[in-house]
Image: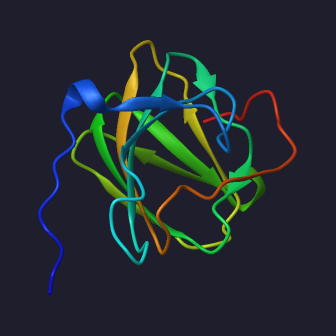
Amino acid sequence: MPESVRVTRASEVEDVSSGQTDGMIRQSAIVNLITPQQIVGTLMRAQSHSSSAIHHHGNQDTIVYAVSGRGAIVSEGGEQVHKLEPGDWALIPKGREHQEVNEGDEEVVWVICRAPGGTPEVVNLVSISSIEM
């Protein structure tokens, strides 16, 4: 039998600190709600002039939906800069090293969905101070 519909209210979305990258605020929305654990949904907030550590998501594919602000996903050792504006989508394949960057003056907000798994998988790598966009 299919599981019941579950809703996470805005007031229930919590900041998470474990297993995440520096420079970003990660908020758990849909985490560990389905058995077996197949998908996870989070909200990423990047303050102005900030960037995450270089990282990848192990065995999880990641879908990004840009809600507000203008940020970028930097990959390929800084060779590729994928700028995202509100309404844009991105797919980050499992194991792909990348960095989220907000060089603008306003907060960037992205909805993040990852699968498989019930909790976000993050593998932090060497950090760099800035990447020119």
Task: Name the residue: 43% across, 72% down.
Answer: 37
Where in the figure is residue 122, as x and y percent of width and height?
66, 54
Where in the figure is residue 22, as x and y percent of width and height?
69, 30
Task: Name the residue: 72% across, 52% down.
Answer: 55
Residue 54, compared with residue 102, is above or below; it is below
- What quarter of the picture does the C terminus occupy? top right
Residue 98, compared with residue 26, is above or below; it is below
Left or right position of 105 against 4: right
Residue, far right: 126
Where in the figure is residue 84, as x and y percent of width and height?
38, 44
Residue 129, compared with residue 35, is above or below; it is above
> For residue 36, what is the image quadrant?
bottom left
Left or right position of 37 against 16: left
Left or right position of 11 against 69: left
Residue, far front: 1
Task: Name the residue: 42% across, 58% down.
Answer: 32
Task: Name the residue: 12% across, 62% down.
Answer: 5
The foreground one among 52 and 71 is 52
Figure label count: 0
Where in the figure is residue 33, as x and y percent of width and height?
34, 60
> For residue 98, what is the image quadrant?
bottom right
